[in-house]
Amino acid sequence: MLKTLPPGATIGILGGGQLGRMTALAAARLGYRCHIYCPEAGAPASQVTSLTTIADYSDQAALADFAAAVDVVTYEFENVPFVAAETLARHVPVRPGPEVLRICQNRLREKDFCREAGVPTARFAPIGSARDLHERVAEFGRPCVLKTAELGYDGKGQIAIGRDTDLDAAWARAAEAAAPAGMILEEFVDFRLEISVIVARGLDGTRRTYVPVENQHKHHILDQTIVPARVSEKVTDKAKGIARHLAEKIGLAGLLAIEMFITADERVLVNELAPRPHNSGHWTLDAAVTSQFEQLVRAIAGLPLGAPDRLADAVMKNLLGDEAAAALAAWSDPNEKLHLYGKSEARPGRKMGHTTKLIRR
Ligand code: AMP
């Protein structure tokens, strides 16, 4: 029997960042409380909720207390230790489930999973030694990309292997960064553009997919998302089909964001999966019938999913470091929505907020 979370129930969120903050705001509108679990005080999500456990993710006693205090657990980033999710899952539903987290935490498992699901990715291989690296680079050809299997994000833990790259030196650098999860080598994809698709799956197995959006990066960090992506109907259908298929195969309860490369000949290759709300889905707060955050809450609470339809075209822009204060000071466009995350320290490169410009016809 499907159990719907009753009004006043508490959603536990692992992680205190902006994704948790925006999820908590959506949960509050539906009458739910949120309890944040994160290692630092004053986190963006804690500012909008009354309950926070400040503890390390390996603190067994704190995890047990948290499990007893909440009705369901979700997470807002995928680098929560797998054992923490597994421990919690013994006491309380964790959605998406720990197995989803395990797959999405590791690029090799992610790509193996796609391969088993029959979904195309760039060619890849695990790399465990300098010799592996020599062999596989010879096989894939240059350029290619060496990545840490775990804990890499926003381009961190990546080494580009170009025409003149010394492989032994690259391996020495990589081995330092990668231990103990290992490395993955990927063929270089000469993509035309990068897109992402967010799919939700409810407890009853219903799936809803947002329109593919186009992501432009600066220094490996998402800069802008253009809604919808400038791709053909064929690519749109293919990308949405992949998202729906992966959501089913992985047994999703919640959200899955899928980053994909689109090549000039319209191939769609999966690059990365994230089992949570995604930066490229922020536009849905202002330009979709149901935001990705509300959709997550509905999915994990056993509520019916909302329509993912787009109400307007949009351009979402991340505000990094000092850009947030500057955007607030210069805010004048009535069709631009501004979101700030409440972070006190505007370090360079830190995501402080975003704007969504609505393009209405
Ligand atoms: P990732 O950390 O895998 O999301 O990679 C960050 C960015 O590096 C991607 O958004 C791409 O722009 C680029 N990139 C990653 N993998 C590849 C690849 N195999 N071929 C070409 N570009 C890549």
Image (cartoon, rainbow, N blue to C red):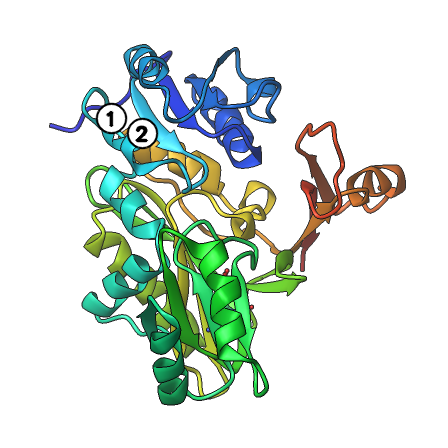
Residue 90: x and y, percent? Answer: 18, 24
Q: Which mark is residue 84?
A: 2
Q: Is residue 296 visible?
A: yes
Q: Secondary structure at mark 2?
A: helix
**Vertical position of residue 342 compared to residue 109: above or below:** above
Q: Which mark is residue 106?
A: none
Q: Is residue 253 left or right of residue 313?
A: left
Location of the C terminus by quadrant is bottom right
**Vertical position of residue 166 compared to residue 202: above or below:** below
Badge 1: few (under 14), some or many (20 or more) residues near its Cα, within 10 Å? some
Looking at the image, which residue is at 45% across and 36% down? 76
Residue 321: x and y, percent? Answer: 76, 43
Is there a contact, CB below 8 Å, between mark 1 and mark 2?
yes
Residue 89: x and y, percent? Answer: 22, 27
Q: Secondary structure at mark 1?
A: helix
Location of the N terminus by quadrant is top left
What residue is pinned by disc 1?
87
Looking at the image, which residue is at 23% across and 22% down? 92
Looking at the image, which residue is at 36% across and 31% down? 74
Seen from the viewer's position, the closer of residues 290 and 122 is 122
Q: Quadrant of residue 203?
A: top left
Q: Amino acid at mark 1?
A: Thr
Q: Quadrant of residue 307?
A: top left
Q: Amino acid at mark 2?
A: Ala
Q: Is residue 334 left or right of residue 167?
A: right
**Vertical position of residue 232 compared to residue 159: above or below:** below
Seen from the viewer's position, the closer of residues 6 and 59 is 59
Q: Is residue 212 visible?
A: no
